[in-house]
Image: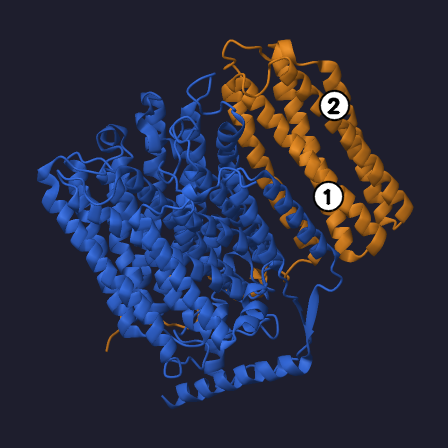
Amino acid sequence: MLGKLDWSAVPVGEPIPLAAGTAVFIIMLGVLGWITRRGHWRYLWLEWITSVDHKRIGVMYCLLGLVMLLRGFSDAIMMRVQQALAINAPGFLPPEHYDQIFSAHGTIMIFFGSMPFVIGLMNFVVPLQLGVRDVAFPTLNSVSFWLTASGALLVNISLVVGEFARTGWLPYAPLSELAYSPGVGVDYYLWSIQISGVGTLMSGVNLVTTILKMRAKGMGYLRMPMFCWTALASNLLIVAAFPILTATLAMLTLDRYLGFHFFTNDAGGNPMMFMNLIWSWGHPEVYILILPAFGIFSEIFSTFSGKPLFGYRSMVAATLFICVVSFTVWLHHFFTMGAGADVNAAFGIATSVIAVGTGVKIYNWLFTIYGGRIRFDTPMLWALGFMVTFIVGGMSGVLLAVPPADFMLHNSMFLVAHFHNVIVGGVLFGAFAGMIYWFPKAFGFRLHEGWGKAAFWFSLAGVVTVFVPFYVLGLEGMTRRLQHIDVSEWTPWLYVSTMGVAIMLVGVFCQVAQLVVSILNREALRDETGDPWDGRSLEWSTASPPPTFNFAVPPDVTGQEAYWGVKQRAIKAERLSDEPDYEAIEIPRNTPTGFITAFFATTTGFALIWYIWWLVIVSLLGAYATFVVFAWRDVGETEISVEEVRCIDRARRAAREARLAQKEEA
Amino acid sequence: MTAPVAPRAEANMGDPYVLGRNVNAGGEEDRSEGGGASKSIVTLYGFWIFLLSDIVMFSGFFASYAVLVGATAGGPDGSSLFELTRIKLETGCLLLSSYTCGMSAIAATRRTLALTEIWLLVTGLLGAGFLGLELQEFAKLIAQGAGPQRSAFLSGFFALVGCHGVHVVAGLLWLGTMMAQIWVKGFRADVMRRLMCFSLFWHALDIIWVALITIVYLMGHAR
């Protein structure tokens, strides 16, 4: 009846997962209780869970990313503490548990922390920057988000029901085959990534279509803000790379469930094929994450320097160069495979060459800052911090691209330092910068600057203190993922690194405080104008938060930096443009389709993990029924009347006029 | 104050740091887009992008098949297993079904309900025929001990051909739902868009099948 599932799956005898699970459970009960007591369920269901508005979905993506970042960070704390305690000692985590923690840390940070955060920002910002009312397929967007949430839920269920994979964030075969990993851990990995991967792919299709087919009138390709360009490149990579992940994980699933021999040691299976396939997705994946961050920094450097982005076209070219070349470097993840000098040299050169594209971007940002009137608001601090950490991380990456050096440093702590330097310093700093930059747009009030700045400085200090010792440890020969350590000489560096994680913890606390304090003081931090940073692209031309339909009248773009031009003309003429003729607006109706689909996806995944076959069939039928019910609906849109549009837009125009008057006085 | 350059010059002209930006920015000749495309274009375009991603997924299976084709682990290889007569029949069914699918699209653009439904039905029957033949082949192979567990080559074969088969199953499910929907809802705009997407999907399966017979069956048979 319940397949492999019985009471032994619940870790009653293991205090750490049990305590963690209980804590999460109590927090969740608390949140649910609070919602019930305040009577917010109806609002939550109507306005958020069933919403197909790209802005709401973007915010939910970011929220999911933030929560999962906290989960991944708690794994990181445990790993640092274990390595500090386990020098010639057992430490507090047994090997089978430690292995789950580093696997979960990587999986969560990439798939459920960074990815939702970055996709959330793209979802929120891209339609606003393009001057359109929503993404191409709003309901599909909701399905994508909820599928991602479903994958995240499965990973979290593994904490208390069964176990998670012990095979690293990429389940290398043959270790991940049934013969060596007989438990449900790898299955949890496979199905949660598979489900969220489908969500990511759909979101990629959606955003590519949006950017290529739905721009505002006059918004030619070379008038798009840089963030839209990087989002386009990133989503093209999603469309081209995620299917490879789907195929690869499907093969591993067939091996595990039906006795196929893709990656097994026997019957002709080829484990190295797994490395090749997974990294031909995996390398583009790192650019899927970093490219949008590059876009965010481009927006921020330009806005806070009060200048157009330097070398716009070279930036576009560099972005697309990285997009294409990212598919030709995957083998550098396993130079030690022994493919031979020729192959390694080719991939080593390609890897060094891809850094040129990034170099172009760095110089463009420097020249954007040069000669500008720089404002050091929190987003700009994150951007400047990114420059430093990312250049260090990037240079160490170029060093690793040299195959002979890589033979020395492969799988060492040096590598761990490198990719954390670029992912934390690049993607996470970018996500935080973007969050603070666009927060006033999403909610209508700014985030508290003091807490934000404290969060930045502690995070930066933490990143440096945690990861610089890793470079040294790697050069001294320490390999990654050690559960216990036999070399006493490494002790000081491991202690420094553990101190660093404490500093980062303060940074995380400041981030949370930043959100809490800002929400409590939202009236004082209110952004009345809709343009709190003196922005340059179209999202700043609408109100904060934007109305459901984003723009009362579709913008007509007449130059680069669409909003900057309009704003300067208004300042010069000392008046806004004439009030336009409003029309009624059709917006897509909300639907619970995404939520229900994800519910069935979760039960399907859970049933497959535990071999509960009847539940698989029931869930798939449920998903099909959901699909049919959605396909059968007759009214897909609701209309917002002219009066309402006019009323909403007049309020926005009044705010702008007040601001214009203020500017004249000053 | 002697600021070297006015960084906030209104147009881009005054700022030497805007290298690479179009000097004509704002000029009427620079206008390249006339606003968003129509809903049917957006939908079909998005579906094309999805199909491309699906083809990338197939290419993953093709690549792994190509790597594993020689790894027979002492078991049978393609030349001793594949029956070209069956493949001819399967190909006939599938290609013919693409033709009938095209006919249904023509009937739908002419808004003739009965013809649309009939052509769709024929498409479905041909698809089901293809699927029957394929399942028969799989059953036969498994019965003679050449199942996917036998060798990596057979794993690759079953996964690649099976993945196409699963797509045909999904297509048939879609087709049945589509027929019911046209029957109930008529040729509504959204139904028409879905029908066009279905046609694209069905034709894409044909393209993949052509690659499949070439690489798996013909090259395997010639081995």
Q: Residue at label 2?
A: B133
A575 is higher (above) or lower (below) than A326: below
* A351 left or right of A210 in image: left
Can you tell which chain is drawn blue? A
Can you tell which chain is drawn orange? B
Disc number at residue B174?
A: 1
Q: Is residue B5 visible?
A: no
* A355 left or right of A502 in image: right
Residue type at numbered disc 2: Leu
Q: Measuring from the top left, give residue A559's x and y in whole percent.
A: 52, 66
Query: A165 and B211: which one is in front?
Result: A165
Residue type at numbered disc 1: Trp
- Neighbour tally class for label 2: few under 14, some 14-19, many 20 plus, Cα within 10 Å: some
Q: Is residue A190 visible?
A: yes
Q: Farthest residue toward the bottom?
A: A665
Q: Quadrant of the C terminus of chain A?
A: bottom left
Between the C-alphas of marks 2 and 1, the distance is 20 Å
* A53 left or right of B185 in image: left
